[in-house]
Amino acid sequence: MEASGATAPEPRRSVGRALAGLFHGRPRLQLGSLLAAPMGWLVIGYLGSLAVLLAASFWTLGERTQAVEQVYSLDNFKELLEGEVYRTITLRTVGIAALVTVTDALLALPLAFFMAKVARGRSKGLLVVAVLMPLWSSYLVKVYAWRTILSEDGPLNWALNPIGLSGPSGNAAVWLVMAYIWLPYMIIPIYAGLERIPNSLLSASEDLGAHPWTTVRRVIWPLVFPAIVAGSIFTFSLTLGDFIAVSLVSKNQFIGTVVYSNFTSNPPFAAAFAVVPIVIMVIYLLIARRLGAFEHV
């Protein structure tokens, strides 16, 4: 017969309670568990693919078989550096990307300022919707629409032919289409940056007798410049790596079109040329970081 003073065994805790007890009071463990899945995807899926791309850029093609050989060589990068045509293509791509970025900044600044500081109530909401609406349509639909507009028998040439003019083509067409497609990506960061500027600063500048342009130059510009740089990250990088739009509206070669055309015939060279915009963007991001752009992304 059992002793009357014996105590009953404690009930076993469920798995959920055990896990709750494990994570309770351990914020680092909670944060690590929360970020484990996305960080694993980032490392394996994204950084892993970049590592494979970098490794493939050093491979070569067999002279007889024309098959990819995992023999490391600098021949692909040597060809890029010594080939004048590839230097021209790189400069053309970077130049168009920079021109698109400057164009979008000039267009976005007054519109974003009106949205943030002038428009009120429903009109502000309608303007935001109008800026975001082009993003709701397919990228290909917009590109093919511009291809139709800029074609030789398109509506733009039909309207300009009577006065002896013609629509843009070549690099000018790429600049126009890219500036249109990526404009919302410049407006939104600038709009967010202007929203952070207190209206009291503008009123104080006005009360002190500053000219409107002085207020823009000495008050608004220093505060909104990081937001402009943040928007330029999108417009510059997206233009730099595009190959669909540039191939549809122009016959000129860009980095993206060369990479695409060599992907099946010479994968190592395509990988090597794909490293070029990555290096350019790393340098660009380092400059943007120094300018405080990441605070507004």
Image (cartoon, helix red, strand yellow):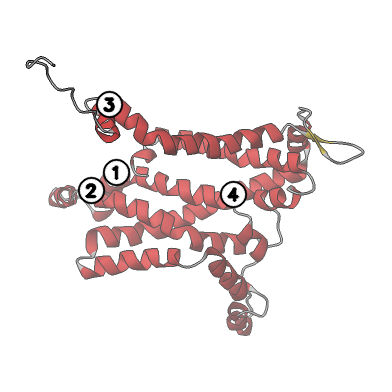
Q: Which label sits in the foreground, 3 or 4?
A: 3
Classify the position of the C terminus by image quarter.
Answer: top left
Q: Calculate the distance from the C-alpha at mark 1 to the C-alpha at mark 4.
A: 29 Å
Q: Calculate the distance from the C-alpha at mark 3 to the C-alpha at mark 2.
A: 45 Å
The residue lying at 76 percent from left, 46 percent from top is 85
- Contact (Cβ within 8 Å) of mark 1 with mark 4: no
Q: Residues within 10 Å of mark 3 (few under 14, many from 20)?
A: few
Residue position for label 4: 241
Which badge, 4 or 2, is on the more N-terminal residue? Answer: 2
Helix, strand or loop status at disc 3: helix
Q: Residues within 10 Å of mark 4 (few under 14, many from 20)?
A: some
The residue lying at 45 percent from left, 57 percent from top is 104
Q: Which numbered tag is attached to residue 22?
A: 3
Which badge, 3 or 2, is on the more N-terminal residue? Answer: 3
Q: Is residue 142 above or below residue 219?
A: below
Q: Quadrant of residue 132?
A: bottom left
Task: Point out the residue furthest to the right here.
Answer: 64
Looking at the image, residue 200 sits to the left or right of residue 90; the answer is left
Q: Calculate the distance from the C-alpha at mark 4 to the C-alpha at mark 2.
A: 33 Å
Residue position for label 2: 197
Q: Calculate the distance from the C-alpha at mark 1 to the C-alpha at mark 2.
A: 7 Å
Q: Quadrant of residue 248?
A: bottom right
- Contact (Cβ within 8 Å) of mark 3 with mark 4: no
- Camera-side residue of 177 and 110: 177
**Residue 148 coordinates in the image, percent (x, y):** 61, 75
Q: Residues within 10 Å of mark 2 (few under 14, many from 20)?
A: some
Residue position for label 1: 223
Task: Identify the amino acid type marked 2.
Answer: Ile
**Residue 233 coordinates in the image, percent (x, y):** 46, 45
Q: Which label sits in the foreground, 3 or 2?
A: 3
